[in-house]
Amino acid sequence: MKLTYKNSLSGIGQLVLTGVLTFISIPVFIRVLGEEAYGAFSIVTLAGNLNIFVNLGLNSALLNFLCVHGRSKESNYNIAATLLLLVVIVVPLSVLAITFQQAILQQFLGLSNRLYEQVSVLYRCVVVANLLLLIGQTFTTILDSQQRIYLTNLYQFIYSLLYWGGMIIIVSMGYGMSGGGWAVIGAASVWLVFVVTTALTVWGKPNLTGFWAAFPRIARQQLTIGASVYSAGLMNMLFEPMTKLLVSRLIGVTEVGYLEIAHKIRSQLWAIMQKLTYPLYPQISHLTDVSSIHRMMTAFQRRMLVLIVPFLLFFFLALPTALSLWLPKANDVTILATLCISSAYMLGTISIPPYYFMMSHQHGKMTVFVQAVNVTVNGLVIFFTYQWMGFNGVILANSLAILSSLTVCLYYQQRYIGPLQLGVRDQWLTWLILFLLTFLLNFVDQQFTNAFLRIGFIGMTAAITYAVLLRHDILRFSSRSGAINQ
């Protein structure tokens, strides 16, 4: 369990530090580039991720195989086959993405000639950098299968530091988005060297004797196992691009910048919860007894809920003030979008453990349906509400989409594993504390007129609250989890 906590906490630390860099960069970009150019920046970095679509499934299938079979000649074959398939598919796709960049950015995404000239170099750099990142993800999969997730988190932080730090420095010096593109490539190159070197050190030199004779069989196996995971991942990747494309076309490019701010905060919160639960994935892959999986999963879900509920309370109280301090020009629409979308996604993280089960236990087709529900609800609600609700329709669509997919995941959990057991009776003291805290905070918060005092009070109350929760609940969870593993 110590290694599990080390992997989880290192991921959370990495994301918090990365989040700080991200949130520092956004005001700098908006101040130097302007709101419209920042909207174009978010669109271009998104368009440059097109080649990532081909990786959604192969590395997940590889992780499942390595967790089950460990270090073996067959595992070496699977690593080499995954890497070869990625290179064969991604390199041509990246060439096409660069060749047709003007059509993609102007005709498909609707950028003007002026904006296209500003972002064309950045776009090409992002495509190349993502090619390097895709190749490196095979090696991070090796580290994850060996429970070295804390190392991948460390290298991810180094990448984020070079990426966002380089972008902030270059943009602030007046080199614009074209100069920032070289920071993107430099960060990806350094990250690739780290993960490849470490993975080969941990795994050892692979024995690939007879690989070419086995490659057709291995390739079919990888593509078959990864097909459903790929489809689900592709659906998930379409969510944000489709949203921004619809907003750009139906409402405006400036509103894409507003949505990007909300999505940045939402993504950081979602990623923290993913990092917290990701060490469960290899463990669930190893287990075959459904009752053991159910006990482990529901234990994590109950504690996740205990952490999420007070966080949402503090989030609603602190965000308007914190966002106005962070971005003085932030409007009410941006605040509303961040509150609604982030809150829905935090509740949606309860679906992560059963989603891991579906990915690793021959239920991949169900993950496709979950993501299809997510994308479909989002697109339909935007299409039918934008004319009379405007940008608020986008906020509603994003929130309803994640809550719909959460409902589907919990249904599949009840069907194949067992129902979600909240354990309210066992945790009555915890919920009583949260209930009383809600009334207290709402009353006291109104007494503060100074923004810094209000943030300080909320932060201090949050620290005390989580200390109480850790004392009365999380430590008990640790002892129970240890009993489950034994």
Image (cartoon, rainbow, N blue to C red):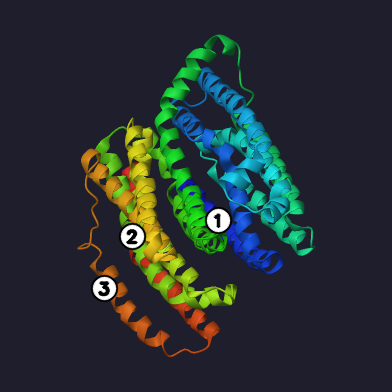
Q: Which of the pair 7/217 is nearer the observer?
A: 217
Is residue 8 something that shows in the picture? yes
Q: Which of the pair 384/365 is nearer the observer?
A: 384
Task: Tell me the kind of residue under disc 1.
Answer: Leu
- Pointer 2: what residue? 305
Q: In this view, does 257 lie to the left or right of 312?
A: right
- Pointer 3: what residue? 432
Give the residue drawn at x 66%, y 43%.
102
Number of other residues with Cα within 10 Å of mark 1, as a class: few under 14, some 14 to 19, many 20 or more: many
* Residue 252, percent from left and from top: 53, 60
Relative to 272, is 29 above or below?
A: below
Task: Tell me the kind of residue under disc 3.
Answer: Leu
Mark 3 or 1 closer to N-term? 1
Number of other residues with Cα within 10 Å of mark 3, as a class: few under 14, some 14 to 19, many 20 or more: few
Relative to 37, is 245 above or below?
A: above
Contact, mark 3 vs mark 1 (Cβ under 8 Å): no
